[in-house]
Image: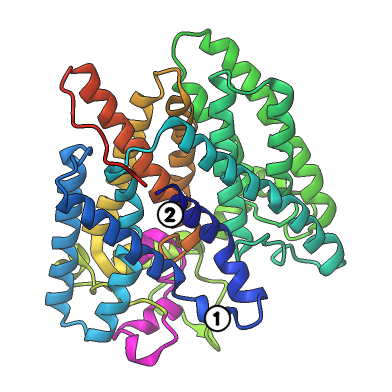
Amino acid sequence: MQNIAYAIIVLAFLINFILTSVPGGRVFRLSPEMLSAVVALVVALRIGQRFPIVIAPRYLIFFVVFLLAITAGIATNAVQPGAIFAGLLIYLRYIPFFLLPVMVDYSREEIVKQLKLILGLALLQFPIAFMQRFVAHKGEASGDSVIGTLGLSSNLSIVLIGCAAVVMGFYLKGFITRGRFLLILFLLLVPTMINETTVSLFLIPLAMIVPTLFVKGIDKIKLLLQVSGIATLVLVVFVVVYNSYYSRWGGDVLSVITEGRLLEYVYKGADVEARTDEGREQSEIGRMDSIVLPFKLIHDPVTLFIGHGVGNVSDISAERLQGAYLEMAISKGAGMTTLSYLIWETGIVGAVLSIVVLLMILRDAAVLSRGDDVFAALALGWTGVIAVLLVTLAYQNLIPVAPIGMLMWYLGGVIVSQRYRMTQTQNSRPYPPPLNRS
């Protein structure tokens, strides 16, 4: 079972690189779905062998309610079969990754090896991003080409900042020294400074400070001051590097905040007549506009509540799999952010449920972080990851992004299952030993 975990991690980091940079790599475009099917089979066999499901009932309730919401959206909108198939693939492919650690009791040693693999692949992004910025695309005005192996510059930043949050958790728990922590932090965050993702300016301090808020049994004020000092230093370097290479904001990214131009950038007050030019979103649709527009355009309260149906708004190249509202994904920015995408396809119910499940994982991570082992360190860092993801819901559409989805749901499953096991142990209600994973 360890090899399956390795496969999830490696594929998450390399799938976009394979698709875009390896000759003939497009034949692997469905590899995340194929791996998901393999993992689903493993999970089903474990359930068939009556292996205990070590997960809190609230997660099972969440999945049932979410599936009912999806079913209601499909039935109400009479979604065509091809779009239903594509939509279910998009929404359900991560569930097996979440359930794998629920059904397989990975040991501390196995989790440590998995985390080392993640860290190694994350650190590999530094030399690749450096080569992309200063060799392969030297002199380009934009940093969009600095993508590492993750397909998009925003994907690279979100994954690396999430890794930095986990490293912060291990530092706060005393598993790594300050010197090593600062070195790893530098190597992880430099790519986010040279790829022009302005949102990193907000996500980096969030990823560093939030885990500090959940640390128990220490002088929290002193620790917050120390971490805030480190975060400030990182931001100073970020601003200097950003201003040196990019001029999107007139050469001064801080002026974006002080002069209010960032708010104008994300919310342009787009109206229902917003259009696109040759399939590209025009500037009048900002990220916040994409979230507000469905409330202006959807007049049927039932549709607003449960959406147009999964797959019905998805931007899919195969014509047979396209839904009836594909134009919305282009002309109204429906696919711009996770929240806008969810509201159009699954309605307010789907958007709320997605936030709720992240908050449930955050709660479990906070409880698990009270320990002093590897799982506690991972959980402490994961509080920062969840904070980053919650903010990113309004910045980028994460649902189709395999690298983020695979890592987030798998490691989320690790935390949720370990928290449940901890609760069972504390309540002196033992469960049968795990099956042989050979």
Side of 251 where 435 appears, left or right: left
Residue 430 picture location, percent across and down = 18, 24
Horizontal side of 344 relative to 179 (left or right) equals left
Point out the tag, 2 or 1, that comes first from the N-terminus.
2
| Image position, residue 111 (x, y; %) | 47, 37
Res 241 visible: yes
Front position in the image: 264 or 55: 55
Looking at the picture, tell me which residue is in the foreground, 327 or 418. Answer: 418
Q: Which residue is drawn at 15% across and 54% down?
A: 65
114, above or below 273, in the image: above
Q: Is residue 309 above or below residue 286?
A: below
Residue 334 included in the magenta stretch of the image: yes
* Label 2: how many Cα within 10 Å (few below 14, some 14–19, many 20+): some
- Was residue 319 drawn as part of the magenta stretch in this picture? yes
Q: Mark 2 points at which residue?
A: 4
**Residue assigned mark 1:** 26
Q: Identity of the amino acid at label 1?
A: Arg
Instruction: Identify the secondary structure beneath mark 2.
Output: helix
SS for callout 1: helix
Question: Which label sits on residue 319?
Answer: none
Residue in the picture at 51% in, 83% down: 276
Span shown in magenta: 316-341
Residue 122 position (above or below residue 320): above
Residue 188: x and y in percent read 68, 43
Identify the residue at horizontal 40%, vertical 33% (top origin): 107
Amino acid, disc 2:
Ile
Give the percent coordinates (x, y) of residue 135. Answer: 86, 64
Indicate the quadrant where residue 437 lies.
top left
Q: Is residue 41 left or right of residue 143?
A: left
